[in-house]
Image (tube, rainbow, N blue to C red):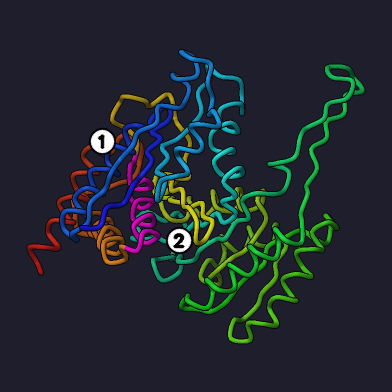
């Protein structure tokens, strides 16, 4: 029996609750599809930082990186300085492990959960490939004349040809496997001239993929089109900053942040899987958070581990729970965290019965 070694970082707020449901589904899938999982939990988050002063030491990072995959809950707590733990844990895992692909599917499973009139699952089904290791997120901020009327704050957007080319190439390869075989570049090169690098690289690499249709939108126009015509998107590639913003809009189209999963990948090396939503500390321990994003992140992790049949079964179980199961609403408080997890587990078990 094949065993997959998973590092688990439940994190803060609702993170431990949604991760618990994701792990229940993971274990059920392992039992059904004949593989094993070896889980190692790491306590790093706000409580650990308050108790020890540690954020994510080098030795812990090395131990985490030695696993086959990482499942992350959420990081962030008002008791910690803004951004310190988010950058020190999430950022460090992404940047120091060079997980340069941030993959965020936007898939509507039932039209009841879409805020757009007249749009259904056939209209909202695309994936955003977000560059994950460059841009303003990884440059150092500078503050001049702090707290004075003359204060100036600077944090540059920095791109490299290597970083841009490898994410664009990954996106073209992915687009080849998608139904529409269409790749849209989203930048703002007309105003942010440094992003002309993206425009040029996209054109150059695109010549190697004549089977993939190319499209190019500025980010403001892309936001409009996502609302007016989401069906026009198939695969999107964009910068770190714009990818963060666009995929939150995409999450709203598919039913909210509790539906949005993501993967942080270095192909051939390591993958980290998480929900897009934050730690939501106000809801911690109240059985309110929607765990579906984490469950779908588990499905993405199964694909990454070579357990594609199990990943597909988990996604189908989520779809069944939403369309034919007991889940009536995705509004906060309509269903409990544990209740939603049970609905997905029942749907997964029902596949075996039906088969």
Reading the chain from its start, which is encountered first: label 2 or label 1? 2
Which residue is label 2 attached to? 117
Q: In the picture shown, does residue 178 fall above or below 128?
A: below
Quarter of the picture holding the C terminus: bottom left
Q: Quadrant of residue 281?
A: top left
Which residue is label 1 attached to? 336
Q: Secondary structure at mark 2?
A: loop
Q: Residue at x 28, y 37 (%)?
A: 20
Q: In the picture shown, does residue 82 fall above or below 28?
A: above
- Labelled pair 2, 1 in contact (Cβ < 8 Å): no
Give coordinates of residue 97: x percent, y percent: 56, 46
295 falls in the magenta region? yes
Is the magenta region chiefly helix, strand or loop? helix
Q: Nearer the viewer, residue 292 or 2?
A: 2
209 falls in the magenta region? no
The residue range painted magenta reads: 290-306
């Amino acid at each position: 029996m094949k065993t997959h070694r998973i590092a688990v970082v439940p994190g803060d707020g609702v993170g431990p609750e949604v991760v618990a449901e994701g792990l229940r589904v993971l274990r059920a899938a392992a039992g059904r599809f004949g593989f094993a999982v070896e889980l190692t939990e790491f306590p790093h988050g706000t409580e650990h930082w308050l108790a020890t002063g540690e954020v994510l030491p080098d030795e812990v990072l090395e131990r985490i990186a030695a696993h086959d995959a990482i499942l992350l809950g959420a990081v962030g707590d008002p008791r910690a300085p803004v951004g310190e733990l988010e950058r020190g844990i999430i950022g460090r895992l992404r940047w120091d492990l060079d997980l340069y692909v941030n993959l965020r599917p936007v898939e509507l499973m039932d039209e009841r959960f879409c805020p757009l009139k007249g749009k259904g699952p056939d209209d909202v089904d695309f994936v955003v490939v977000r560059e994950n290791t460059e841009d303003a997120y990884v440059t150092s901020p500078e503050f001049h004349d702090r707290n004075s009327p003359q204060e100036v704050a600077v944090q540059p957007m920095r791109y490299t040809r290597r970083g841009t080319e490898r994410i664009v190439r990954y996106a073209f390869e992915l687009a080849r496997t998608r139904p529409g075989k269409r790749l849209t570049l989203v930048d703002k090169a007309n105003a942010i001239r440094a992003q002309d690098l993206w425009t040029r690289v996209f054109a150059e690499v695109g010549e190697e993929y004549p089977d993939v249709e190319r499209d190019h939108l500025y980010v403001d126009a892309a936001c409009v089109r996502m609302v007016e015509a989401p069906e026009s998107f198939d695969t999107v590639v964009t910068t770190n900053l714009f990818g963060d913003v666009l995929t939150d809009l995409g999450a709203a189209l598919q039913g909210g942040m509790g539906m949005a999963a993501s993967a942080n990948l270095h192909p051939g090396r390591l993958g980290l899987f998480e929900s897009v939503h934050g730690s939501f500390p106000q809801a911690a321990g109240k059985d309110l958070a929607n765990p579906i994003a984490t469950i779908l992140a588990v499905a993405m992790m199964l694909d990454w581990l070579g357990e594609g049949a199990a990943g597909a079964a988990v996604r189908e179980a989520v779809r069944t729970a939403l369309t034919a199961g007991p889940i009536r609403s995705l509004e906060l408080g309509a269903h409990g965290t544990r209740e939603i997890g049970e609905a997905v587990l029942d749907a997964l078990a029902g596949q075996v019965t039906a088969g």
